[in-house]
Image: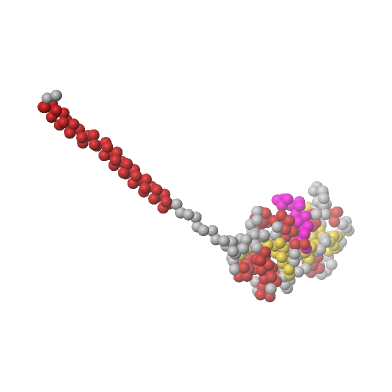
Amino acid sequence: MTKQNRLMLRISLLSLLPVLAGPVAAADNNNVLAATSLKETSAARKASFRAPPAIKSDAAGALGESEIVFSAAPREAPGAATEIYQPVADYLSQVLGRKVVFKYPGTWGVYRTEMLKGGYDIVFDGPHFNSYRMEKMHHNVIVKLPGEHVFAVIVRKDNSGVTGIKQLAGRSVCAHAPPNLGTLTLLSQFDNPSRQPAIVSTDGWKNIYQGVVSGKCTAGVLPLGNLKKFDAEGMAKVIHKEKALPNLAFSISPRLSTAEQAKISNALISPAASGATEKLRKSHNVEKLIQTNNQEYAGLAEYLKNEWGYY
């Protein structure tokens, strides 16, 4: 190769260096950018991930820091129920040092649904419900109204055609709609579903009594104490008396600790509760609340056996 040719080859190679270096430099630049992007992405991911907050220990009791739900059977209108039960909820909030919320169920259907799914922590209602929660939900019955339930089935005094409860099959009976305990005690006397009384849903014990003496219904069921108060003129006669049953009571969910249950029990019978329970006691004509136990309410869930949704 001549000297001139070697010179021309060197010049050609030198001219190609920028072209050859371009892809290599671009690749290096891309690698740098990719590494930078990866670092930024990793940092972004770390910044966006936060560890969950620490869970507080359950020092306050079985329910931790959550609200405690107090409810009662919907016997009263919403306003009346709030007047009766809200002071009790406020008082128990002070006793426990935790928020107790009164929740009015509105209807018996809602009450049953919420009760069965465990939506209530403190409940005030009839003995059959207390017994049911003991049996199915492990509640403890702690405090009750003094006295007993004795339900009487009555007819007009001049009704000589009905002398026993079994004769009421197919006949009209003024009573509260089930699951009222008085009505369930009546229905428990009839084993054959096709041979039962026809319940005429009637609100209020006095209205039940008047429904019988006016001839609207063949019979009625009401507490014996109410009958004595209404029937001063002796217009009715008793054809059946149910066994004596314990009065309405408070039950407590096992979600509350044993210590909390004891606090509630002692607090409700304490003289300090007189203001908080005043309207509750007046609505049932009692002077005080008294302590009770599960044994007193055992077996009374039987009255709910034929009610839909319980068993």
Quadrant of the rendered image containing residue 109: bottom right
* Of the pair 290 and 169, the residue shown nearer to us: 290
Q: Residue at x 78, y 68 (%)?
A: 147
Residues in magenta, as a range: 296-311
* Of the pair 236 and 89, the residue shown nearer to us: 89
Quadrant of the rendered image containing residue 226: bottom right
* Residue 140 x, y percent position in the rendering: 71, 62
* Residue 209 x, y percent position in the rendering: 78, 63
Magenta span has 302?
yes
Q: Residue at x 54, y 58 (%)?
A: 55
Residue 177 in sight in this render: no
* Residue 35 as seen in the image, left or right of residue 17: right
Residue sitting at the far top: 1
How many numbered marks are there?
Answer: 0
Is the residue 10 above or below the residue 178 in the image?
A: above
The N terminus: image quadrant: top left
Residue 57 in sight in this render: yes
Magenta span has 19?
no
* Residue 27 as seen in the image, left or right of residue 209: left
* Residue 77 x, y percent position in the rendering: 65, 63
Q: Residue at x 65, y 71 (%)?
A: 276
Q: Residue at x 66, y 75 (%)?
A: 272
Colour logic: secondary structure
Is the residue 20 above or below the residue 56 in the image?
A: above
* Of the pair 90 and 194, the residue shown nearer to us: 90
* Of the pair 68 and 206, the residue shown nearer to us: 68
Quadrant of the rendered image containing residue 84: bottom right
